[in-house]
Every structure is written in structure tokens, then in C-alpha cells.
Image (spheres, rainbow, N blue to C red):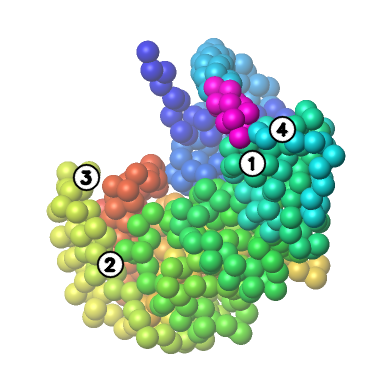
Amino acid sequence: MEKKKLPQYIRVARKICTRIVDDIYTEGQRLPGLSTLSSLYNVSPETVRKALRLLDDMHIVKIKEGSGTKVLSKEKAEEYLDSISVRQEHLNLSNELRTLYQEYEALGKQMIQISSQLVSASAIPVSENMTLPNYEVVVPENSDKIGLTIGELRFWQSTGATIVGIKHNNRITISPGPYSHIHKGDTIIYVGAPSCKEAVEHLLFAKGQRTLYSMQDQILQAIHASELRVIATALDARLSDLKDFEPLVKGMTNRSFLFTCKNHKYILRIPGEGTHSLINRAEEADVYRAIKGHDLCDDNVYLNPKNGLKVAAFLENARSCDPYNSKDIARVIKLLRKFHNLKLKVNHSFDIMEKIDLYESLWDGNDSKYPDYKDTKEKVKSLIPFVDSCKKDYCLTHIDAVPDNFLFYTRDGEEQLQLTDWEYAAMQDPHVDIAMFCIYSGYQKNDVDDFIDKYFNNKCDKQIRKKIYCYISMCGLLWSNWCEYKSFLGVEFGDYAQSQYSYAKDYYEIAMNTK
């Protein structure tokens, strides 16, 4: 019988309680904001909000409008974690893990048996004293590469060396194939340039090393190996210098990997599923050229304008903006104003209704999951005449100016702020950035009005405010359609998708009732 998973917001509530019990969050302490928690747990702000409401109802935390959420009781958090439902879930997960491990163990034994047969069949008995014009290295007993095959090691790609033989139990296997296993104490005989010796030792001796080619299956699904050589060249490095690859939490548009090169950390961005239909990468490259030198974000190390592959320097200890932290908001608004006042220009624009239709066309004839979608879309379209009648000062607009894209980090002892991820940026009314920040923050109307007031120094006239309400409705439908397209590709965004559709409907009514 299939076991049901707990709802996502309950799982988030459990994780928050665990941090309270572990004294990571202490009684009286203010919890991080919605954006930070949603990034931490890889869920939407709405899911975090539901989790916090649950904990508020149980008197574990206290939600206070305008000042965030504070921890009330470690004892009640412990009681929650000790509840029968949680213990039962732990038991279910343990049983599932045990079953999976048994299946994995059986499959592993079968693979080892078949591989051993292949090695025995290809082994050639020769004298152990045989010498070759080559190098040798003994696999250390504590190497974490023991049990892997040559193919899994990506030996040649990682080191530039070629294995010509393996000494194992007084036998030498000449020209071992990719399915030959590495055992402790094996002597690997290889040929290559003298410079490859360091790379071979590093591959076999570095504990926990995750080389580029140990991640190759994930990375090369999206890019060609020749592109990686271009990246290495851009970093003034060899291919084998790209190492310590770690997949980061999957973003909404792209996949990203953290890696090191010559003791520096970088982020490799690989465009996600269906992205080629959503984003023009040549236009993205034009945007980065336009903002270069304006201190809005660090320059890219590498950007391919054809396929969107990007490498950027990694920001140590960076954090996203907390949309409920007044100091963060003040810094964000200052940066937004600075960007908008630059009046930068590019040769492409972002038409919201045109993009709504584009994303819908990518559904390949499928209907929306929302029964009232057609009615909602007609209502949103009816806002266009008013928006078109408003004064707009078109310039380069970020479009995706959401809290997660405002990154705080420390440089030279001072906290800095930059705006990242410019792939949707184009010519538009800069007030669209205000709408985008509000809807991704999960703002209620009073929060929206407060953000608008701060951006305009309490001097926003009624027409502009109504125009921003219209943008919130239009952008809500835009990202709702985007989410539906991604869902047809097998990528789901849960509560985030629902919240965007709700903004489309709710702010149509708010805009219509604003005089």
C-alpha cells in the first residue's frame, strides 16, 4: 500500500521545530523572513506562511504583523516533534529506506559479479616484473574511489592520463576496459605527460573529491564537453582544474553547480527544461553588456549568448533579501531607484500580455488547470487600456526583481548588495519591478502599499498606484502561465503557482475598485 507523504507545509513546520529544539532558533528570537526560509527549504513563500500559521496556532511561534515571527516555546516544539504522526512518519521512512538499501545491495553485488567476470576474461597472465615506459601509482586503502570502475572515474578526462594496465593479486590486466574496477592496493600503470602525475594522485588520494567528470552525467546532458574546455580557458586553467562540483538547489528557471578552479569558487548555470522557448540568450548577453560598469552586479566570467551557459564568481556567505526586514527593504529600494534612474537602453522589450500568450501557446493545446482561466485572462486583458493611458518612462527593467535576486554579501569588511539573474530583463515600465517584488514576496495589500510608499517617498499618486495594481494582476497571470508550461515538462512549483494565479484574480478586483 502506497504511503502518503505529509503536506509540504507540515514538513517545513517540522524542520523549523527541529531548529528550535536544537537551539538554532531560541525562545524570543525572530525567525528569518519568508524569502530566506523559502530558499532554505526550497519551497514557495506561501508554503512557509502556512507552516508558520500552523506553528502559531500551536503556540510554538508568534506571528506579529509588521515585525515578523518570534519563537515562543521550545517545549511545545519538542511536543510537536514527539507526536504520534511524526513518529509514524519516521517509521515509514525507515522501512522505505531499508527496502531501498536491500535492493541497492543486491544490484551492487550483481554488478560486481558481472564486472569481475569481464576483468577475468580480459586479464593476460604476464610476469609481475614486466616494465613499461610509464608511471605507476598504488591505490591507497582509504581511497573513496575503491570499487568504482575506470569509466565511473572518468580517468582520462579527469587527469589527461591513459591506463595501460592494472596490477591486482599478482596479475596484470593489460588495457583494462571501462568496466574494470579499482581495488585497494591495486597498482595502476598509466602513460601521459609528466604534468598528469599530480592530477592522478589527486584523483585517487583526495577524500570526497567530486571532479567534473564524476558529475558528468548530470552536466553533459545539457552542454558539450568542448564548452567545458572553453570555460577552463576563460579561467586560464586546464579541464582537470575544474573540480569539487556540487549541484545547488534547483532554481525555477535553471540548474546550477558550485565548483572550484585554482582555489576560487564559481557558479555554473545551465539553462533548465524548456528555457530555450522562454528566454533569448543573445538578448540576455546584450543586457549584461548594458549594465557592465554600473556596479549593479559582478561581471560574468563567461556567458554563451547562444545557449545561455554562464559562469559567475561565487559570493561567500551571501544571503537573499528578507522582504519583511525594513533595513533590507531600504537597501533594495535604493538599488532599484539607482538602476531605474540610469535609464539604460537595449534593443528588445518585454510585452507582458504578449508573453502571457506565448507561455499559453507552449501548452501545446492543453487546457489550463484552472476552470475559470479564460474568464480570468479576459479580465486581465481588460486592464490594458488603463495601463496604456498612463505615463510610462520606458527603460531597461529587470522584470524578475524578486527578493531572491537581491543578494547581500560582505566584501572588504562591508556589506554589499547586488541584483542578479538578468535573463528576463528588457525595455519596460520600471514600475513592473515593483509589482514583481511584491508578488514574489507574498505581500498582502497593506505590504504592497507600504513598499510602493517607500519607493516613492510617500508621493505616489493614485493613478500610478492603480497602474502597479494592474501590473501585479498581469504579472500574476504571466508567471501562472509560466508555471503551467513548466508543469507540462514535469517541473512543478506547487503553492507558488497557485499564489500567482490568485494575484492575477485578486488584483484585478483591487485595480477595478481603485478610483
The location of residue 226, given as percent across then percent down, is 53, 66
Q: Which mark is residue 355?
A: 2
Residue 202 is one of the magenta-drawn residues: no
Mark 1 and mark 3 residues within 8 Å of each other at the beta carbon: no
Of residues 109 and 440, which is closer to you in this image? 109
Query: Against 254, is 8 above or below?
Result: above
Residue extent of the magenta highlight? 110-122
Badge 2, how many Cα within 10 Å: few under 14, some, many 20+?
some
Identify residue type, mark 3. Tyr
Q: Give the labeled residue for mark 1.
A: 176
Identify residue type, mark 1. Pro
* N-terminal-most mark, 1 or 2: 1
The quarter of the picture where the C terminus appears is: bottom left
Mark 3 and mark 2 residues within 8 Å of each other at the beta carbon: no
* N-terminal-most mark, 3 or 2: 2
Q: Give the labeled residue for mark 4.
A: 125
The location of residue 47, given as percent across then percent down, is 46, 40
CA–CA distance between discs 2 and 4? 67 Å
Identify residue type, mark 2. Lys
Observer-side mark, 1 or 3, equals 1
Q: Give the labeled residue for mark 3.
A: 370
Observer-side mark, 3 or 2, equals 2
Q: Residue at x 59, y 67 (%)?
A: 229
Query: Against 7, is 303 above or below?
Result: below
SS under mark 4:
loop
Q: Residue furthest right?
A: 129
Badge 4, how many Cα within 10 Å: few under 14, some, many 20+?
few
Q: Residue at x 61, y 61 (%)?
A: 267
Observer-side mark, 3 or 4, equals 4
SS under mark 1:
loop
Horizontal side, residue 500 vs residue 408: left or right: left
Q: Where is residue 479, by image quadrant?
A: bottom left
